[in-house]
Amino acid sequence: MMIMPYLYILECADGTYYTGSTWNLEKRLWQHQNGQGANYTKKRLPVKVVYCEEFERIEDAFLREKQVQGWSHKKKLALIERNAQRLHELAECQNETHWSRHLDKLASTPLGDRLSCSAANCSAHRAKSR
């Protein structure tokens, strides 16, 4: 796996989600799974990657992390499931002009070009699930 900045969402043993960002997803997942990650995940092991996005700059991954951290459990689930319509329904700002800027991106690929992995295709997840 190439070391790139990532936003990631972990599903914890209690069904809650933890959102973070990192330079090295595989290493960070190992830390979480071995109790060396955030205090939140230490108390909710085991954890698994259910979603991630790759970025070119760590600053962008961090900003996306902060955005997603403010979302409800339902909205995070819609992101994980790549359900653009449900994301739109759950958005606080449903201004059609604002939303229409994102529809073309969402239509071309599930949740835009940054999307690089999920539980199904995340190499860090596959490596740890074996």
Image (tube, grey):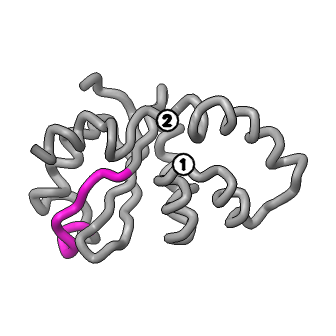
Residue 62, numbered label: none
Q: Which residues are magenta?
A: 41-50
Residue 37, position in %: x, y? 21, 58
Q: Are marks 2 and 1 in contact (CB under 8 Å)?
A: yes
- How many other residues sit within 10 Å of disc 1, few (<14), some (14-19) or many (≥20)? some
Picture quarter containing residue 112? top right
- Residue indicated by mark 1: 82
Relative side of 26 to 86, left or right: left
Relative side of 110 to 61, left or right: right
Picture quarter containing residue 71? bottom right
Query: Residue drawn 23% across and 46% down?
Result: 28
Residue 68, position in %: x, y? 53, 57
Nearest-to-viewer mark from 2 and 1:
1
- Residue at mark 2 to residue at mark 1: CA–CA distance: 10 Å
Picture quarter containing residue 14? bottom left
Query: Residue drawn 23% across and 43% down?
Result: 125
Q: Tell me if residue 105 is in the magenta stretch.
A: no
Disc 2 element: strand
Type of amino acid under label 2 = Leu
- Residue indicated by mark 2: 115
Query: Residue drawn 84% across and 48% down?
Result: 98
In the rendered image, the quadrant that contains the N terminus is top left
**Reading the chain from its start, which is encountered first: label 2 or label 1?**
1
Q: Tell me if residue 46 is in the magenta stretch.
A: yes
Q: Is residue 65 above or below residue 53?
A: below
Residue 88, position in %: x, y? 72, 57
In the rendered image, the quadrant that contains the C terminus is top left
Q: Is residue 30 above or below residue 54?
A: below
Relative side of 92 to 129, left or right: right
Type of amino acid under label 1 = Arg
- How many other residues sit within 10 Å of disc 2, few (<14), some (14-19) or many (≥20)? some
